[in-house]
Image (tube, rainbow, N blue to C red):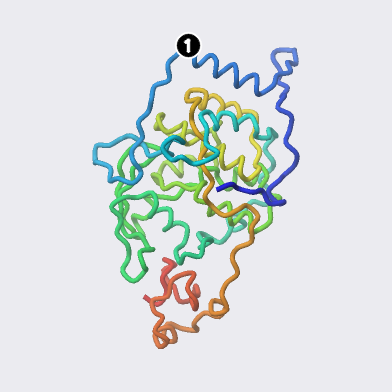
Amino acid sequence: MAVRHGAACRPGPTASLAQTCRVGDRDVRRGLSAVVALLVTASLTACTVEAVTHADGEGSPAATTSAPRAEPSPAATGEPGLSAGAALDAVGRLEVKGRAPRTGYERDLFGEGWVDVDRNGCDTRNDVLGRDLTDVTTKPGTRGCVVLTGILLDPYSGATLAFVRGAATSSDVQVDHVVALADAWQKGAWQWDGPTRVAFANDPLNLLAVDGALNQQKGAGDAATWLPPSKPYRCAYVARQVAVKHAYGLWVTEAERDAMARVLTGCPAEPLPVATGPVPGAPPAPPSDDAVVPFASCADARAAGAAPVLRGDPGYGPHLDGDDDGVGCE
């Protein structure tokens, strides 16, 4: 869907594409559009871009499969707004500025953990696991919400990983913010309002289930400092970062802009992923009258015939959910 920018999402007017860089003792004025055009021309005349076959996101990957999952082509989806080269073209529309200080950043400024922004009764982490994993099993009594096991074709490494929910195993598969929250903070999110930050942190466009160790390795890195080890997935990864930053009005550093252009020049037909999450700046849906007052205890919930009660259900409260899995009074 088309994503509108809320007032809080616009850090400032788009900067000129012309950027100044120093070579030796000379200042050379150059336009980003000219750089990108030159890189594209060179790539098309000097080499043949090898086609990459992506695994079908709806199927069950074989144990030996190494091709990463990626966004389908615009021709396959028929979705409007996706054209060949859209991702590379969008790089030139990103504002280029220096990185702001990280002062004041806290994870909780983007919401207290995973929330249920779409009010489907399931928190964002479980929504993403259910989307990205195959052969999924869910916890009984959660209406298919809480993912217990599944298979991940990890896009960052190309490896096939087993997910098993548990204190010692859940972190093997993590949900990554493709544009890290700390990176977003330093490139415009520090001036957003609370609802916009929560929407950003829970937007499916910016989330992928990935190998936990690689997610930790990435940290808050941008395209200039970290790329997935799986080279065939880098085009889709960078295109997703471009889409997120473009949708939310986040800027990029010069080094980051150049890295994005360099990757996408190798795949000039890479489409720009479609935003499917909440509209930036839109306030969360108001709770129903019943949801305002949670059950005082699980005994009350059971007496009312409401147990188990899911996060987002009328009567749910964190005090009913001791293991914080989204299911109270199990």
Expressed as whole percent of the image width and height from the top left, the position of residue 271 reads 50, 34
x 66%, y 23%: residue: 32
In the rendered structure, which amino acid carries the disc numbered 1? Answer: Ala
Q: Is residue 299 left or right of residue 9?
A: left
On screen, residue 73 above or below 130: above
Give the residue pinned by disc 1. Answer: 46
In what quadrant of the picture does the C terminus appear? bottom left
Local crowd at mark 1 within 10 Å, few (<14), some, or many (≥20)? few
On screen, residue 321 above or below 267: below
Q: Quadrant of residue 29?
A: top right
Q: Quadrant of residue 143?
A: bottom left
On screen, residue 133 above or below 317: above
Q: Secondary structure at mark 1?
A: helix
Q: Nearer the viewer, residue 142 or 216?
A: 142
Expressed as whole percent of the image width and height from the top left, the position of residue 98 reads 69, 34
Q: Is residue 94 left or right of residue 218?
A: right
Expressed as whole percent of the image width and height from the top left, the position of residue 11 reads 72, 44
x 62%, y 57%: residue: 109
Q: Nearer the viewer, residue 123 or 296?
A: 123
x 60%, y 53%: residue: 279
